C-alpha cells in the first residue's frame, strides 16, 4: 500500500513554522511497510482543501490529513473531506457531551464554536483524543471503485502522535494485511459522482481571483 500526507494550515506556509508531523508520520508508515508517495501543505482555504483531498483520493491508497480539526472558522478539514466525498457531517452527541464535560472540569463554559469538533463524517469512526479536544477520524471503503483509507488527525504534534500510536497504528497494520469491507456510505453516490466530475473538469482550471472564494 502507499500513502499521502496532507498537512493543513496557513501557518505552515510561512518561514516561521515547520511541518514536523509529516516527518513523524512518514517514519511510522515506513515501519509498517507503507510507502509515502506524496506530501503537500495546504493553507486554510476550503476550495484548495477540497481539491487536495480529491487529488489524494485518486492517486493514493491512504490519505492522511494533519491539522484543521479545531474549533475556529479556518479549521476546514472535516468540511473539505466531506465535500470531496459527497458525504454529510453528523454531530455526535457523545463527543459533544465529552467536550462540554472537559470544559466544565476546568471551570469553563464551552464556547459554541467548539461544538463543530463533534462533527463526524458519515460512516467514519471517531478516534478519541486524550490530549486535546478535537478527535481524529478514520474511514475505509471504496472511492472510484478502489479501496481507500482516510485518516484525519489533529495538528498539534503531541496530540497527533498520541492519537496515531493509540488509535491508528494497529488499524493500519490490520488493513495492510487484509481487505476491509467498505461501508455503504463510501460507495459511489450521486453526490460523490458529481464531486469526481468536478475534479476531472476543474483541477486544471487556471487560478482566478474573482472566483477563488465562491
Image: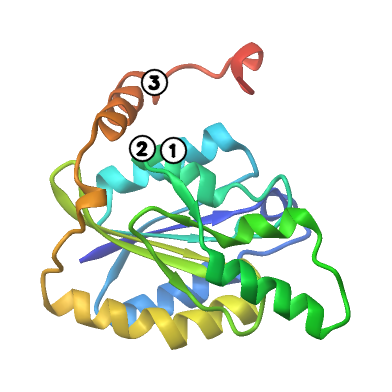
Mark seen at residue 83: 1
Mark 3 lies on residue? 202
Could you tell me which secondary element the residue under label 1 belongs to? helix
Label 1 close to label 3 by CB (< 8 Å): no
In screen coordinates, is 61 left or right of 109?
left
Q: How is the image coloured?
A: rainbow
Q: Picture coordinates of residue 134 (x, y %)?
A: 61, 68
Q: Tell me which residue sits at (29%, 77%) in the image.
A: 172
Q: Residue furthest top?
A: 210
* 14 and 185: which is toward the camera: 185
Query: Does 102 appear above or below 203?
Result: below
Residue position marked by numbered label 2 in the rendering:
86
Label 1 vs label 3, nearer the camera: 1
Regarding residue 131, the answer to whether it shows in the image is: yes
In the rendered image of this protein, does residue 199 appear above or below residue 85?
Answer: above
Q: Nearer the viewer, residue 78 or 63?
A: 78
Amino acid at each position: 500500500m502507499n500513502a499521502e500526507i496532507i498537512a493543513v494550515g496557513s501557518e505552515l506556509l510561512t518561514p516561521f513554522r515547520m511541518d514536523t508531523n509529516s516527518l513523524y508520520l512518514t517514519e511510522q508508515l515506513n515501519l509498517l511497510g507503507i510507502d509515502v508517495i506524496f506530501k503537500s501543505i495546504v493553507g486554510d482555504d476550503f476550495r484548495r482543501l477540497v481539491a487536495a483531498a480529491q487529488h489524494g483520493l485518486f492517486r493514493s491508497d491512504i490519505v492522511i490529513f494533519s491539522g484543521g480539526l479545531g474549533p475556529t472558522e479556518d479549521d476546514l478539514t472535516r468540511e473539505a473531506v466531506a465535500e470531496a466525498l459527497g458525504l454529510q457531517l453528523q454531530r455526535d452527541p457523545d463527543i459533544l457531551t465529552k467536550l462540554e464535560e472537559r470544559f466544565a472540569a476546568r471551570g469553563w463554559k464551552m464556547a459554541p464554536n467548539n461544538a463543530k469538533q463533534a462533527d463526524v463524517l458519515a460512516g467514519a469512526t471517531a478516534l478519541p483524543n486524550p490530549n486535546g479536544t478535537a478527535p481524529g477520524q478514520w474511514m475505509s471503503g471504496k472511492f472510484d471503485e478502489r479501496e481507500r483509507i482516510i485518516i484525519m488527525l489533529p495538528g498539534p504534534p503531541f496530540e497527533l502522535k498520541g492519537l496515531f500510536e493509540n488509535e491508528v497504528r494497529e488499524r493500519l497494520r490490520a488493513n495492510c494485511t487484509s481487505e476491509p469491507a467498505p461501508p455503504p456510505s463510501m460507495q459511489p453516490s450521486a453526490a460523490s459522482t458529481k464531486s469526481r466530475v468536478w475534479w476531472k473538469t476543474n483541477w486544471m482550471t487556471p487560478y482566478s481571483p474573482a472566483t477563488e472564494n465562491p
